[in-house]
Image (spheres, rainbow, N blue to C red):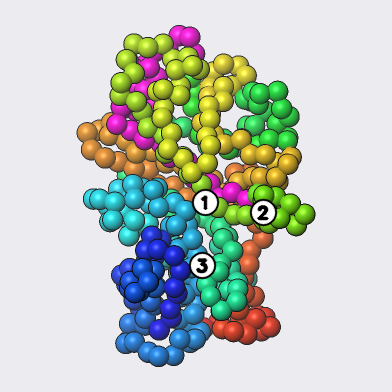
Amino acid sequence: MAVSRIGGSSGKIRGQVGDTIYQVKRNPDGTYTQYVYSKGGHTEETLTPKLQAQRMCVAMVQSIMRDLKPVGGISFEAGRNKTQSLNSFSSSNLRLVQRDCQDHWYSGNKFIFPSRHRTDLLIKDLGGPFMLSSGSLLQNTFDLVEYDDRPIVNYQDVSSWDYQLYGLRFSAIFDNETVDAFLHRHKMTRSDKVVFCGFRDWIDYTVHPDDPDERYQNDYAIVSVNPRIPGDTVLTPSVLPDLFPIASSIPFDFFIGRDNDLFCIGHLCDFQNADEQFFYTGGFSISYAKGKKQISTSFYENPGGGSEPWLLNAQPANVFGSWMGEPQVRPYPSPF
């Protein structure tokens, strides 16, 4: 049995995946403990390589669930409610991580596996091509802001190389198109949502200015359509904030294309002063256009293009020794 005691109940995994059973129990002090059992029965041996490998994979999924819990609760079409959607979000990503771990133990592949630090579960958040959403909808509402798209929008008189924009891009016909016409052209209803997610990296000078910390976090923006805006309202840049309310983990804003033919809903990263950028991005739509809820399928992808992530892979074999209390053993033999 492997045990992990961190934080609250959000982000923890329940149920069975393959031969492994996941349980969450409440402690007397109000904290929660994650238990990982083998299907064959509970065992007192907590450092068996196979269960520790499962624990390493669980830690990765817990990290993204903690950051993207508001997204996971709405992003799986098969989930009839928030709890079912979160369960699908966690189990689907756990299978992806486990498969990558087993199939590429020595070489590494898509996911970046973390070391375990000290005796508790303090994990440096690392990314990979996690599944953000799943459903039957063909997404054609927006495009992701690509790395080479940055010069097309105005950055409020700052260099586009000092500040990097990431988010969602929409075509628009300003001063001519009505709100209803825009929604119809993008196959959207007043009940629809569009969602952006990204794995962000930056240098934090606030705590230790002379020795800053590198930070990682999964961020999101959930964009709704305001049903109170009249349909005959002419779409202009000033209308956008009222038409598209945003619930997000960090500030997101509206950026207008230089040719006045598009707008972006995005976060402007301070690359010059904080080395801030997104290593992975993704987005999906939630639509009611056909009278029922449909969601498009999406994964994290490299915003710079191509299939490889920007971050270097941390092969399971090269970090797994820290999970077994033997960090000096590299590569560690595969437990599978």
Q: Nearer the viewer, residue 293 or 9?
A: 9
Placement of 59 over or under 332, stated as above or below: above
Amino acid type of the residue tagged 1 in the rendering? Asn
At x 34%, y 39%, the residue is 286
Q: Mark 3 points at which residue?
A: 100
Which three-letter amino acid code belongs to the residue tagged 2?
Val
In the rendered view, would you say 27 is above or below 8? Answer: below
Q: Residue 218 carries which label?
A: 1
Instruction: Relative to 270, say whether 260 is above or below.
Output: above
Residue linked to disc 2: 207
Residue 332 visible? The answer is no
Q: Is mark 2 in CB contact (under 8 Å) with mark 3?
A: no
Task: Please provide the residue range marked out in magenta.
Answer: 174-201
| Residue at x 70%, y 41% (from the top left corner) | 271
Badges 2 and 1: C-beta atoms under 8 Å apart?
A: no
**Residue at 40 percent of width and 90 percent of height:** 44
Q: Residue 143, position in %: x, y?
A: 50, 34
Between 175 and 31, which is closer to the camera in this rendering? Answer: 31
196 within the magenta span = yes
